[in-house]
Structure formats: structure tokens, C-alpha cells
Image (spheres, rainbow, N blue to C red):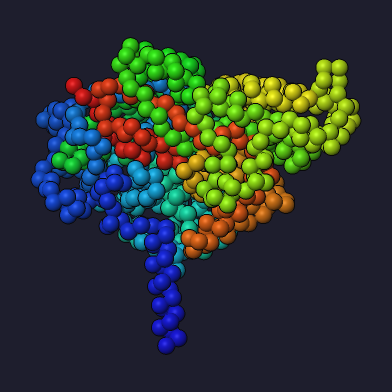
Amino acid sequence: MKRFIERLALVCLVISLVLNLAPNVFSQQASIGQYSTIEEYERATGKKITKFSESPMLADLVKQGKLPSVEKRLPEEPIVIQLIEEVGKYGGTWRRAALSPNDTRIRDRMGYEPLVKWGRDGKTMVPNLVKSWELTNRGKTYVFYLRKGVKWSDGEPFTADDIMFWYNDVILNKELTPLFPAWLASGDKPVEVVKRDDYTVEFRFAAPYSIFLNYLAGPDTGVFITNYPKHYLQKFHPKYTPKEKLDSLVKEAKFDSWFQLFADKANPNTNPELPTIRPWVLKSNPTATRLVAERNPYYWKIDTVGNQLPYIDKVAFDIVQDTQMAVMKAVSGELDMQGRHMSLADYTLLMENRTKGNYDVYLWNEGKAGTALYINQNYKGDEDITKLFRNVKFRTALSLAINRDEINALVYLGQGRPCYVMFPFTSLQNDPNIRKLYEYNVAEANRLLDSLRLNRRNKDGFRLLPNGKPLQVTLLVGLGYPMHPDVSELVKTYWEKVGVKTAIDTVSQDLWWSRVQANNYQIVPHYLEFCEGFLDMSYSSMSFIPCRALTYFAPLWGLYYESLGKNGEKPTGDALRSQMLFDKLKTSTSKDEQDKLTEELLRVWAQNLWAIPTAGSYKIPIVVKKNFKNVPKNASLAYSYCSPGYLNPEQFFFEE
């Protein structure tokens, strides 16, 4: 009887995990944007797919004997994509703008092909390169069944060996991956990845891992797994290539080491030779002013009548200097569909030129809260400033000095929502102690600053530190983000009204990124990666938990967590408590407990004001040419979804 009860408890636990964390792939509905197999499509709709068709440009290559037939190129069980409007037409070049080769986002936003992915509802996890998955071993082992017959863009098969190459030869190689990624660990122990057969792999964790699927579907984590074709990249790896030959390749490419060469060859943004499983394959030299990606002849998804996707032949990215140039290309009718680098500040201009540019303007949720001021708790440049930054009274004073209503009117065009709506719990939204942190209260801001012995001022009215030195803070602003510069200018005026001299250091996006990575900044204006109606604990968490080096309010505390304690600095107090709560959440198998822990984490963050928000959510304009079809009018541009990737851009098309 005891053994029976134990078995029953185990079955209940696994069922609970499956229901909460990994929806059964056989019950997917069309509302999520796809059917995992043709059989599933036919069973759900009563319709049959009796033949496959392909793009005329590929049909010509088949006739010339340069490609196998479409039947031989597609997998045994291609995914069937539900079309947003109608069956599309083949052809055309999708014109977009980018600030650099890395900004094309060809590997994620434009080529979102992880093992599992977000469905179009933004809530459901759906199979992608895997046909299905299951949880075993009390929720500690994820078993993934790969889709048989998927091929890389050069025709070579995609199998478990490619995943094992990523794990054994990239993740476990100290020269390529010096620090084991925290997202691949649970219970403080790294995952073990095991090949069961050519199309089955297991991810074995030391403890249950409630948000692992979220990480697999995420932009900075799971999308990388499918980036390593073993048959191609092993040529640049010492495990598979003799040292003499590899040294020659390194020298020829003008690198100092094999791992630099390998990283270059594995970069889909800059290496046109890298095979891919994405809908479009980069073909241009990365130094070109226009980068072009062409359709993948071995792409493994079809529409509801058997047409191989994508519909569009090519995607072309014009490299521009800044976001305003991208907006002007849209106004001139030179962009076919794009939301990246558009901003509410551009909305009026975009609307006024719709007829001239022959486009429509949709408003999508950005998937982010408005510009927040991340106060760097790990700043190293000035001990007096760091001491102030770590004082919650100082951060509260800075928050109270901000006129959010004015920012909403001038920057968000009245479309911004109050900060408190970004919390997914009414207990936080209605908490008066949290709401008052976002009020405009200059008198209280001045009182708090005075109480910190900052009551002395110079002849210009700016406050002095207790040691008599001028108090000045600096905002590091990147030009690659449309709204942050405008918000920063307003914040400067607000803070200087209460005597805090504020400088704005505006730099190019590349320089901004290098400064951030080097922890060389005081305050960074940046988005919060969650907002009203959107919170993904695998990605959004870095905005309110010091769990990644990209936690801008505490990059060294985040690095400590991300490196499993090997690098960075160990936090104390509420920051350390947040990390411990996050660990508990990740191993929890109860949805109710996960919600309680998330609520507690957000409360700790809100009370500490490590990041000072200015708006709880807002919309962003999406430019869509009138002949560009299958684009939803309402959607999200959330990076966590790799948008527009989660909308299946392979089914976008040009109407004649």
C-alpha cells in the first residue's frame, strides 16, 4: 500500500508539472498559429493535404538538377502553419532597416527557430524543431523528440548530434564557454544532456526546473542551441580537426586563436556560409551597406494547402546610421514591414505620411515598460556616488522628482500607463506604499535629499556632497533606442530642479554596449523587460532580479548569479534574498507557489527602486505596406517572443 501511494504521488506530481509547465503538444489548437504535424491538422480541420508545392525560384533549380524535389527536402512531419489572413503568394523582397549586421536579428527575431517556441497567443509553449516532449524523473528530466527529416540549409540532416555538439563541444568547452550558463542549471548543478537516439535527447537536471521551457524558447538562451551545425563547425574545432590544419585556418582568417575563429564562423549575423534551419539564409558580405538573406530551400514548414514556406524570396536590410534614418525610410515608403527602431515619438509623422508611403500603421504592445532609470549598485568610479546609489532614500528622492504625467504627454503621446499597472498582481497595483513611490512630489524629494546631508548647495543651486564636492550623476544613453534620449532630457530637468546636477552622455549603440558590458556607467536609461499584460520569468526576471550580467542595476551581482558564484560580486541584503527566492521559484512544482514567489520578488524590487520606471506600458507603431499581408493588427513586439518571430513571418507575403 505504501508503494502504491508513493507511485500515485509521483504520477500526480508529473501530471501537475505537465499541465503547468509543458502543455501536451497533441492538443494544440489553431489559435496558437500552427499544427505540429499534417496528421494533427487533418484531424482538427477535416481537410487533407495531398501534395506539396514550392516557390518558382526553387522549382527552377529542381528542373536544373541543382536541388532535390520539394518532397525530398521537407521532413517526414513538417509543421503546418495557420495563416493569419489567407494563403499567400510566392515572391518579393521584404525591405527593412538595421543599424548594423548584428541588428538584422536574422538569428532570432527574423529566424525564431528554437526547439520549442512561444505560440501566437503569447501564453502557450508549442513544439518547433521537436515534435513533442515529456517530463520524467519527478519533473527533473525533459525528454525531447526531434522532428525527423529536418535539414540544414545545405541539405544535411539536423539530428541529436547537432544538439550534442552544442552541449559537449561548445557549452562544456572552457575556451568557448568559460562560465557554465546559469540557465542550464537547477539545484546549483549543471544540466546533463544525453543522446538517447538520433532523434531523442534528454536534459537531466538535479532538481525540478519550472521555467526551463521558457528559457528554451528565449532569445538569449534557447535560440543558440540550434545555431551549431556539427558537420560544418567541426572543421573549426580542435576535437575534430588536426592542430596544423586548424592553425593554418586561424592564421588565414587573421585571428589569434581557434576559438575566435570558431565564434566568427558560428555567427549567423556575419557568416554567409553558416548552414541554418531558419526561413532565410544570409548571403551578403557583412561589410555591405545592404545585407540580403534568401529563402532557405530546405525550410521545414508548410501552409495549410501544402505550400513550402517562406512565401517571401528575400529579406533585405539597409544599414542606416541611426533610428531616425530608419523612420525616414518608412515615411518614404522604403520599408515593407517594421516596428524595430520606431517609437511613439514618431507616431504623428508616420500617420501623416501614410498615403504618401502607401502603408498602414498598427499599434502593438512593446512587451516592455517605458524607460526606466537603472541605478548601478556596482558602480566603481566614485565611492561617494556609489554610497548614495545604494541608499534607498536617495533613489526614492530621484523617483519622486520625476513628473511622469509630463513624460507621458510629451514622449508617450498620452498613451503611457501608470507605473503600478506593470505588476501582474492586484495586491501590488493597489498597494499605496508602492503607488506613492511613483508620485510627483518635489517637496518630499527635497526633504529626503536634505536628510542625506546633501542640504548644502553651490552658487548655481546644485547640491554638494558631505565632503564639499559637487554632486553630479550621469546618464549613459544609447542612440540605438528611440525614446530613451527624450526621456533622459526630461529627467535631467526634473533632477536638477531638486539640485541634483545631471549630465547626459549620449553615445553610439556599439559604444553604449561596450560601456555597459564593462560596467562603466552610473545610470542607464533602458526598458524594463516586463509590462502590463506581459511577464516571462525566464527573461523579464533580469529587470528586477540580479540574475544576469545584463541586470543593469547590478551587473556584478547578476554576473555572480549567472556564473554560479564563480565571477562578479556576491550581493547582500534584499538583492541576495531575491536571488534565493528566484532559485526557489525555479525548482517549485506548484503554480500557486510560483505566483507567490513572483509577487514577493516584484515587491522586493519595487520597494528598493533599484530601477526607477516612468511608465507601466505603452504601444509602439508598426509600419506595414498595404500590399504586405498576413500581419496581425494587434500583437506584441516583445523581445522575449523574438517578435515578429512568434507570429511566423515565414507566412507573410506580398499581394500582387
Left-right relation of 336 to 345: left
The picture places residue 646, in percent across and down from the top left corner, at 36, 40
Residue lying farthest to the right in this orientation: 467
The picture places residue 109, in percent across and down from the top left corner, at 40, 35
Residue at 29% over, 44% down: 33
Residue at 57% over, 31% down: 371
Asked if residue 638 is positioned above or below residue 141 in the image, the reply reads above
Residue at 87% over, 34% down: 453
Residue at 33% over, 22% down: 360
Task: Please say whether residue 270 is visible from this viewpoint.
Answer: no
Q: Quadrant of the C terminus?
A: top left
The picture places residue 7, in percent across and down from the top left corner, at 41, 78
Observer-nearest residue: 553 or 402?
Answer: 402
Residue lying farthest to the bottom in this orientation: 1
Observer-nearest residue: 135 or 467?
Answer: 467
Q: Quadrant of the N terminus?
A: bottom left
Asked if residue 544 is positioned above or below residue 620 in the image, the reply reads below
Task: Please say whether residue 344 is visible from this viewpoint.
Answer: yes
The picture places residue 553, in percent across and down from the top left corner, at 65, 39
Observer-nearest residue: 475 or 424?
Answer: 424
Q: Quadrant of residue 409?
A: top right
Q: How many marks?
A: 0
Observer-nearest residue: 142 or 572?
Answer: 572
Left-right relation of 631 to 501: left
Left-right relation of 609 to 4: right
